[in-house]
Amino acid sequence: MFISKIIISEDFEGIKEEMIESFGRNRLRFFMPQNEFLLEDARGVEKESYIAETEEKIIVLMAHSFRIEAQNFLLKLLEEPPKNIKFLLVVPSKNSLLPTVKSRLICEKRKFKKESNSLDLDLKKMDLKMLFDFVQENENLDKNELRDKIALLAKECVKYKDFNVEELEFFYESYELARLNSKGGVLLATLLLNYYLKK
C-alpha cells in the first residue's frame, strides 16, 4: 500500500521508473509539465482523481516549480482525497511548496544517485581528438545526465587550471542551459574548448 507523500529530488525519470516498477503502469497517472505546474495542470489532477477506481490509484505530480494558485487549488484534494486515490509530489526543493501543502503530506528527501562519478576523460592529456570523441559519446545524454556531466567537468577542470569568476559563471550557465534542454554536444564542446585553449 502506498502512502501519499512528497519526495524532494531532481531525479524525475528515476522516480518515474521506480514507481512503474513498484506499482505497475495501470495504477499510476503522471502529470509532468515541462517546467512549471500550472492551475490547468491542477484542474487535470482533480478531474483524474474523481474518476472512480476499484483499486488504489497513485497520481504523480512532478515539476521544477508549482504555481501558488495550483497549490492552493490542490489543498482540499490532498487533505480529503477521493476513495482509493493517493498522491506523490516530486519537487527539486522543499521551498517550492507552500507550508500548507507540506503540512498535509509526509516529506522524503532523496539523495540523487550518481550513475558515474568519473568523467571518462583525462583532462591533463586531452587533445582535440579526445575532446571530439568525448563530445560525440555524450551528445545524447538526457538533461539530468548532462547536468551531472557538466558539474563533474567543472569540478575536474578547476583541479588543473585557474578560472576567474566569469569563467566559472560559464559552467553554471551551461548547467542551467542543460536544464532547459539545450544541446549537450554544444555545451560540452564549448566548455571543453574553453578549457583546452586556456593557458
Image (cartoon, helix red, strand yellow):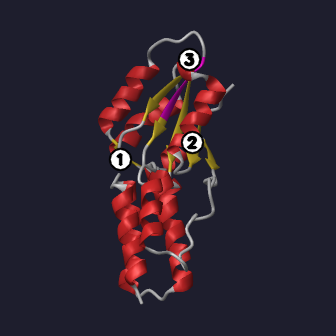
- Residue found farthest to the right: 1
Q: Is residue 68 above or below residue 93?
A: above
Which of the numbered marks, if any, corresponds to residue 14? 2
Which of the numbered marks, if any, corresponds to residue 117? none
Q: Residue at x 54, y 36 (%)?
A: 16
Q: Residue at x 33, y 55 (%)?
A: 182
Q: Could you tell me which quadrant the N terminus lies in?
A: top right
Of mark 3 and mark 2, the one earlier in the sequence is: 2
Q: Amino acid at mark 1?
A: Asn
Q: Is residue 53 above or below residue 5?
A: above
Q: Residue at x 43, y 44 (%)?
A: 63
User: In front here: 190 or 29?
Assistant: 190
- Residue found farthest to the left: 40
Query: Residue 17, position in %: x, y?
Result: 57, 35
Q: Is residue 25 above or below residue 145?
A: above
Dot 3 falls on a residue whose secondary structure is loop
Which of the numbered marks, if any, corresponds to residue 35? 1
Circle 3 residue: 83
Q: Amino acid at mark 3?
A: Lys
Query: Residue 57, position in %: x, y?
Result: 55, 21
